[in-house]
Image (cartoon, rainbow, N blue to C red):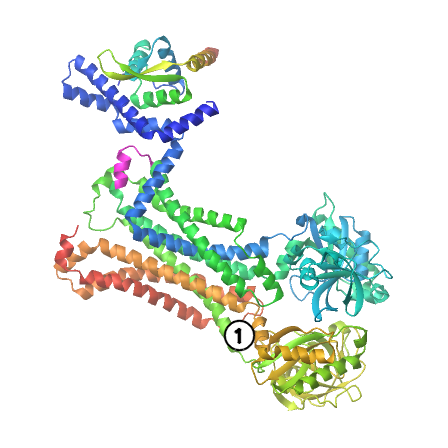
Amino acid sequence: MDRKQVELLQGTLDLLILKTLRLEPLHGLGVARRIEQVTRGTFQVKPGSLFPALHRMEEQGWVTSTWGESENRRRAKYYQLTRAGRRQLETETERWGRISLAIARALEAT
Amino acid sequence: MPLLRRFARLCRNLLRRSALERDLDAEVRSYVQMLADEKMKSGARPDAARREAIIELGGVEQVKEEVRDVRVGHFLDTVLQDVRHGLRMFAKNPGFTAVAVLTLALGIGVNTTIFSLVSAMLLRKPPVSDPDRLITLLSTNPTPDDEANRWPASAPDFLDWRRQATAYSGMAASSPDDFTLTGGTEPQRVAGAQVSANYFQVLGVEPVLGRAFLSGEDQAGHGRVVALREDLWKRRFGADPKVLGRQVKINGDDYTVIAVMPESFRKLWLFPAQLWIPLVFTPEQLGPAGRKQRLLNVFGRLKPGMTASGARAELATIARRIAAANPDSNQGWGGNVMTVQQYAVQESNSKTALLFLTAAVGFVLLIACANLANLLVARNSSRQREFAIRTALGAGRIRLTRQLLSECLMLTLLGGGLGLFFAVWGVAVLRSALNWNEYSVLTAETVSLDGPVRLFTLAISVAAALVSGLAPALRISQRDPGAGLKDSSRSLTVGREHRRLQSGLVIAELALSLILLVGASVFVAYFIEETHASRGMNPHNVLTASVTLSGAAYKDGARQCDFFENVLRQLHTSPEVQSAAVASDLPFTFPGSARFTVEGRPVAKPEEQPSAGYFAVSPGYFSVAQIPLREGREFTPADNAGSAPVAIVNQAFARKYFPDQDALGRRLRIRHENSEGTKWSEIVGVAGNVNEFLGQDAPRPQLFEPFLQRPDPSMNLVVRVGTEPTAFAESLRKAVWSVDKDQPVANLKTMDRVVQDAGQGDDLMTGLMSAFAALALLMAAVGIYGLIAYLVARRTHELGVRMALGARRGEVLMLVLRESMSLVLAGVGIGLAVSLGIPRLVTALFSGFHIRSGWILAGTPLAVILVALASCYFPARRASRVDPMVALRQE
């Protein structure tokens, strides 16, 4: 396994998925690949955590799903942000900003 | 998530499960396909690409299981799954299910039954308002004759307490008494009480009709008023609402009815009164001598913010003050308080018996749980593969444990439900058996399967599931799934860890049932001894009844004598009557006692004089009761008020006070109540010993005086008849009423019944304990049989090999028996070690209990070993008869 990969922090997976879906609806593999891509391979999202996360967010009402056709003409389930999902993304982003700032400060302080 | 949305999701998840599952499956599969497409693009061969994709995914089923975990209502969903799965398992193993449920039902049923009794006797609050703040105040004796040391109060003490105490918003006294109610169809003897005017306020009980007593109505010179209890009002006055203001005759005097009190009063067995009249103190009671007459029950209601311990300290101070001012009557006397409920529990004297019963049924349930655990372990070991496969498919340890526990819980809940039905029957049996005195009858009425009892049933059902299911469940879920798959049914012997658990359970079962059997045997032995002990009299064919004379006509002793002599004369005219007499107390009913001084010996202070059981009897009493006279003569009609005082003593008396001399001709001065006797009575006879209560260890000295010289308004008729005694009851009543139609006849009972009732429920205790012990032994036998049969069945293959290699039948039989009997002996050994202490424990906790325990400690283990041997023998014999070829082929 690549040394540069790190374990996802609890709660950050939701943020990443929401962020990924903000641009366009994606299917599960698409979400995983996009996250890999934008984090330059630092995060590899495994199906074992991706699917529960997607389904939980759907239960929460942040995303909805529809069946569509993939680029390779495969039937695939696409996930799309809802209005509640957008709001959630905002609060999560803001929260993350606070956390990273705090941690950065803490690290600088020493 | 908003609640509504959550609920909608829950409904969708639960109701549209199959659609949801199809969707999930399609989604995961499409993911795999797309992943495989990717891999093919980068040059992998199609089948290799697909394999890699699935490996990368981590297993289709595992991912699906993880998704299911996050669904709303997932927990409920899995519970339903477990229930469905459990029901399927039960349907597949009806024998297992039936045995498990039935055993549990028996165990839970007996526990529920006994708890209904505990709840009725110890936990129920008295039917007064705010019962926890209702306090009873007691005197404590400087030289207590029992640990409880509860004494009533005297009138001056009560008045001092009421004046000086600050902890109470009200304090009231009651003096229980029996009253004669006349003026209706027939005279009636009714339990009642004289009470302070504020009595009902203190208790917090409102009348159903009319008004409570007014303050001042308990002062001398006020009109006579009475409050009736609802059931008496219904029975005697036909529930007439116009009863208020009516005159009734009580003890020959006219009283005006002012109130009807609720029937709920009777549930409080401490207050058996059916009617109440104001308590008016006489000048004599209020005088200095009155302090020695301790007859009043005192109640107080605590003020808000006051505690019982504060009230106790205050009362102790007040009592010290009174003792200092009145050393003659109160030297050393103290005060104590307790809530009415605590008092009722202490007074019912049932705690120890209930403790034993509870322990006994607890053991029965433990044995049932051990059996269930054994069954589960046995069944689980044949389900190894199933568990291994479930684990491989993504079921976690917790999930597996939960599944096993919920199966177990379903069994125990079914058992609990059925047990409740058994308990309905058990309660009916209890109710009919609680009949030996008025208090036990009142208890019987309150025993029921009410809310708290049913809650208890539910609680022990759940507890039983945990106790019996947890160990097997953990054991299974800890196993490595790979081992489970490999460890197939081909293995020749049962896994060692299973056998250790099962052996432990069997040992525990045997130990528990032995302890229970020894406990029960102690009671049975005592009961047998009690029922077969020499009575010292002949109770058969004797009818008894009590008559307490009331009314102005009988204030005088001579008139009392006349009345009873006339009744006896009347009785003797009846052809059925062989002989008849009167006695102040019946045998076996805890008689009164009297202190005395023996002539020629130093006169002690009144409190230090010796005392003996005391009876006043009419001429002919000894021949009616068939109590043998060892020396001297019986009383005759000539021993009357005009002749020299005489007395008869029993052998125990003679042996104790005249060990080396002849008792006949010696003289005693007998002291009654608080008045020193003035005359010497000559001993004219020595009678055989008759016990004062059942199971008495050594006879107590007793003293008899002629009724004609010592008349009393309250006597018992003792009539020996040639026919069935109960058939004579009506004639006896008529004989009394032919002399005076206003005198009630109470407690009509055969003497046999009096003796039986004197057992105070010993027969019930013995019956229950032996039933529980038998149940325990039966369950343990079923448990041993089940385990040995199971082990043997698992070893059929091995035994077949042994026999094929030349082992003989007898050897195989012995092999199986030896192994099982080592378990049995271990269990019996442990049980016996614990049991050694039981006889001593019982004799220490039950006063008057005495038994010879040697044969019990020798006999019961033998019985257990025999039963265990029988339950091992049959499976062992079956094993030895198996055809080796069949055994070897069997898989």
Residue B593 position within the rendered picture, expressed as x and y whole percent measured from the top left: 70, 75
Residue B766 position within the rendered picture, expressed as x and y whole percent measured from the top left: 49, 67
Q: Looking at the image, how many numbered discs can be counted on the residues?
A: 1
Out of B769 and A76, give the one closest to the viewer.
Answer: A76
Return the residue at label 1: B530
Q: Is residue B717 above or below residue B881?
A: below
Residue B195 in sight in this render: yes
Q: Residues within 10 Å of mark 1 (few under 14, many from 20)?
A: many
Question: What secondary structure is found at the residue carrying circle 1?
Answer: helix
Left or right of B653, for residue B496: left
Which residue is pictured at 64% across the width and 90% down the height?
A: B631
Q: Chain of mark 1?
A: B
Residue B396 position within the rendered picture, expressed as x and y whole percent measured from the top left: 33, 34
Q: Looking at numbered disc 1 in the image, what kind of residue is underneath it?
A: Glu
Q: Is residue B139 above or below residue B67?
A: below
Which residue is pictured at 37% across the width and 59% down the height?
A: B779
The question of residue A2 being in magenta is answered with: no
Magenta-colored segment: predominant secondary structure: helix
Residue extent of the magenta highlight: B386-397
